[in-house]
Image: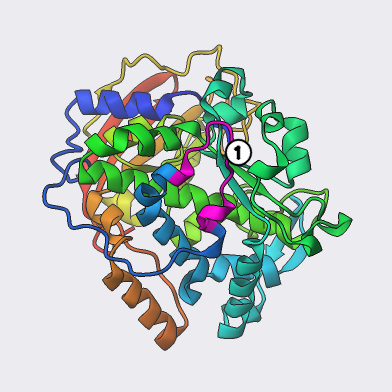
């Protein structure tokens, strides 16, 4: 499941940044003319076939399936191309290790071999026998729990658990669910038949907004939808493997910030966690897709804590190029007032209060980067590099629009810049 985050801050900062003159449009992050249509050529993965989608109450997938197709094709590539199956092979084959934080998955050599990738690929095809996708019904939103209202998708381990723990689950009959072969209806697979509930406004976008949208808007939603699908499939895959029944998810890697296998997949497949914010698909179609990093620190006499935080936020390349003199006083509607006690939020916000210093780096993703994922020539490059070097690298961000929000000793500033890192990000 996508983790809960502090309410509205990213939308608030983006909207005020645009007001203060940050040129998302001028720097190619919003509307780009004459965009070509997607030209990826692959088939749809069995997990995303139409017969794996729920029918019944407020489910219109059969109507919008054609409009979803580019997103489904991209998501299918991430589940079927050997070069990008590293994370799934890691979940399947890696060894479980205990450390001071809990359990993490330790890499093993086999996960980076053609045979290891094929094992993962076959297991993902097997997952397609039991997985279910659906859209949260629109009349449920006002009754939804906080997590449901603000997550792009939620994965539950079984149909029985789904119907027992959601208000809307009881509205669906057995005939509304996709079929499951008899061998997976045993007690052994009781909590290994995952169901993924997707935000209702994805369906609204494809059903109502899509005909009037520009190619740029469609590309942004296609990419976001594809990322959410595979993010949730990462959770589903772990459930299906049954490696930690009743325990939950491990840290995907020894350096993971939290036990969240979906975000681990995004970092390794895309190089960034895409659009990690509250908001709606409508907002996503009208603002840039983004990625973000956060850090908190306490003031100290020599400033070392802040320097460490800056290295976390920016890294060497971006920090070196950022125009630190361009601060603007920030008087937006969201100012991290003392009443926002965030100790109940997960890392990286866990334990944060308004008394801590806080840095929030938002990078608006260019349409060039967004569209590139739908180009066959880039996937040919990924495949070729894997064949020659057994290595995969995500697409680089060669031009980025950055907005940096900082609360330092009670003073809030916002800084912005368009930078072109020499080696990409």
> Does the stretch in magenta take in 54?
yes
Q: Residue furthest right?
A: 187
Residue placed most toward the observer, 126 or 105: 126
Q: What residue sits 69% from the left and 72% below the top? A: 93
Residue placed most toward the observer, 245 or 343: 245
> Does the stretch in magenta take in 116?
no
Q: Is residue 204 left or right of residue 98?
A: left
Tell me the quarter of the picture where residue 12 sits: top left
Where disc 1 sits, the SS reads: loop
Q: Residue furthest front?
A: 175
Tell me the quarter of the picture where residue 205 sits: top left
Residue 346, percent across and down?
A: 62, 35
Q: Main secondary structure of the magenta part?
A: loop
Q: What residue sits 43% from the left and 37% below the top? A: 202
Residue 51, percent across and down?
A: 56, 54
Q: Residue furthest bottom?
A: 388
Q: What residue sits 64% from the left and 51% below the top? A: 178
Q: As displayed, is residue 32 above or below residue 86? A: above
Residue 313 visible (yes or no): no
Q: As displayed, is residue 320 above or below residue 128? A: above
Residue placed most toward the observer, 355 or 86: 86
- Range of the magenta residues? 48-62
Q: Which residue position holds label 1?
A: 347
- Quadrant where the N terminus sits is top right
Residue placed most toward the observer, 147 or 128: 128
Q: Is residue 53 left or right of residue 20?
A: right
Residue 395 visible (yes or no): yes
Residue 339, percent across and down?
A: 56, 11
Q: As displayed, is residue 117 above or below residue 371? A: below
């Amino acid at each position: 499941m996508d983790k809960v985050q502090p309410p509205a801050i990213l939308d608030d900062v983006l909207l005020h940044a645009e007001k203060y003159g940050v040129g998302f449009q001028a720097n190619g992050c919003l509307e780009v003319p004459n965009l070509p249509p997607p030209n990826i050529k692959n088939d749809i993965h069995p997990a995303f076939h139409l017969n794996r989608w729920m029918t019944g109450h407020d489910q219109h997938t059969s109507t919008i399936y054609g409009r979803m197709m580019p997103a489904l094709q991209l998501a299918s590539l991430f589940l079927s191309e050997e070069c990008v199956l590293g994370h799934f092979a890691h979940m399947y084959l890696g060894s479980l290790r205990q450390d001071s934080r809990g359990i993490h998955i330790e890499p093993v050599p086999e996960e980076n071999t053609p045979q290891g990738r094929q094992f993962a690929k076959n297991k993902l095809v097997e997952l397609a026998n039991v997985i279910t996708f659906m859209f949260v019904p629109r009349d449920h939103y006002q009754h939804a729990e906080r997590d449901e209202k603000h997550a792009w998708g939620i994965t539950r381990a079984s149909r029985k658990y789904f119907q027992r723990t959601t208000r809307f689950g009881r509205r669906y009959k057995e005939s509304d669910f996709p079929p499951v072969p008899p061998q997976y209806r045993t007690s052994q697979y009781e909590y290994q038949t995952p169901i993924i509930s997707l935000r209702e406004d994805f369906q609204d976008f494809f059903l109502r907004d899509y005909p009037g949208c520009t190619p740029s808007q469609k590309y942004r939603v296609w990419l976001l939808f594809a990322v959410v699908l595979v993010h949730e499939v990462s959770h589903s895959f772990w459930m299906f493997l049954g490696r930690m029944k009743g325990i939950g998810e491990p840290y995907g890697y020894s350096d993971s910030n939290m036990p969240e296998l979906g975000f681990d997949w995004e970092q390794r497949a895309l190089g960034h966690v895409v659009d990690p914010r509250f908001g709606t698909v409508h907002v996503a179609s009208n603002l840039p897709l983004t990625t973000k990093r956060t850090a908190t620190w306490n003031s100290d006499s020599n400033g070392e804590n802040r320097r460490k935080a800056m290295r976390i936020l920016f890294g060497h390349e971006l920090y070196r190029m950022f125009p630190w003199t361009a601060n603007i006083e920030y008087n937006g509607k969201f100012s991290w007032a003392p009443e926002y006690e965030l100790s109940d939020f997960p890392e990286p916000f866990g334990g944060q209060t308004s008394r801590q210093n806080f840095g929030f780096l938002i990078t608006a993703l260019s349409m060039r980067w967004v569209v590139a994922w739908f180009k066959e020539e880039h996937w040919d490059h990924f495949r070729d590099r894997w064949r020659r070097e057994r290595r995969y690298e995500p697409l680089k961000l060669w031009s980025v629009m950055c907005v940096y929000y900082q609360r330092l000793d009670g003073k809030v500033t916002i800084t912005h810049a368009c930078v072109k890192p020499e080696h990409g990000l």
